[in-house]
Amino acid sequence: MSNYSLDAEGRNNPSGVLVNSSIELYEGKTQTNSTVWSSLDAPPLPMVERQSYILPMAVAALKETITEKGITSKHILIGLTTGAVAEMSWALLDPRRPVTSPEKAREEGIVPYMPELPLPHEILINYNQTVAHIRGMHTAPSGLESTCLVLVHGLDLFVTRVSPSKTFDLLKEDFDYFLITVVLVVLTTTSFVVKQLASKKIVKQAWK
């Protein structure tokens, strides 16, 4: 089963609670042969997976993270009317989340379905700062696969970077460059010396 389209949108209902609907379209239960195609054959109808979720706060803007190669996990950025910006894993918005937790879903890492999406303070990317009257958000690759640049605009501008799958391609700030340099120099020198000794040994054996 392969996914070829997805959509997520939020809407306010009369009760003031935000209902978020997540939709994914799949080719079907069997994989089609993309190498054989005919205009006379009708395309298979897609399978639609859809679930709705409740957010405890009103949403002003939604945007997904983007990286260079698309290898990093997808996260959804949620701009709230309170001025906060939350970073939520796409796994929580996956429409395949089962009401129960069968073995197959557990093996795929799909979490059980819960109608209300939590918004703890730990997922806020602007911390104690707020962006008044958020009008939109923009994301762009940063040049590193692990990092995505985020711009939130309204009455204020807020720019930051997020790492959905952690900074797996960045060195830590306390990385010991001096030690690594010394080790590389020693290894390079040792390999050069060993190569010269091996050459001399071969020459001596040839003269015997």
Image (tube, grey):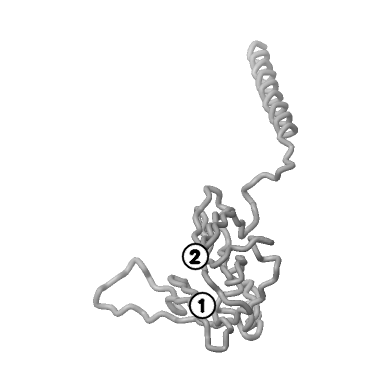
Residue position for label 1: 10
Q: CA distance from mark 2 to mark 1?
A: 14 Å
User: Are the residues at dot 2 and dot 1 in contact (C-beta closer than 8 Å)?
Assistant: no
Residue at 52% x, 48% y is: 143
Q: Nearer the viewer, residue 82 or 174?
A: 82
The percent position of residue 119, horizontal first and vertical second, equals: 66, 73
* Residue that carries the numbered disc 2 in the rendered image: 136
Label 1's element?
strand
* Residue 21: x %, y % from top left: 52, 80
- Residue furthest to the left in view is 40
Residue 185 appears at what percent x and percent y? 69, 26
Say which quarter of the image contains residue 4.
Answer: bottom left
The residue that appears at 60% across and 65% down in the rendered structure is 85
Identify the amino acid type marked 2: Gly
Q: Position of residue 163 (x, y in %)?
A: 61, 56
Label whose residue precedes the other's in the sequence (2 or 1): 1
| Residue type beneath disc 1 | Gly
Which of 105/55 is in front? 55
Task: Relative to 150, say whether 26 is above or below.
Answer: below
> In this rendering, is residue 199 above or below 144?
above
Q: Residue furthest bottom?
A: 15
Looking at the rendered image, the quarter that the C terminus falls into is top right
Instruction: From the viewer's perspective, tell me whether residue 4 is left or right of residue 129.
Output: left
Q: Which mark is residue 139?
A: none
- Quick check: 14 left or right of 127? left
> In this rendering, is residue 19 above or below 200?
below
Image quadrant where residue 84 sits: bottom right
Measuring 52% from the left and 69% from the top, which residue is drawn there?
62
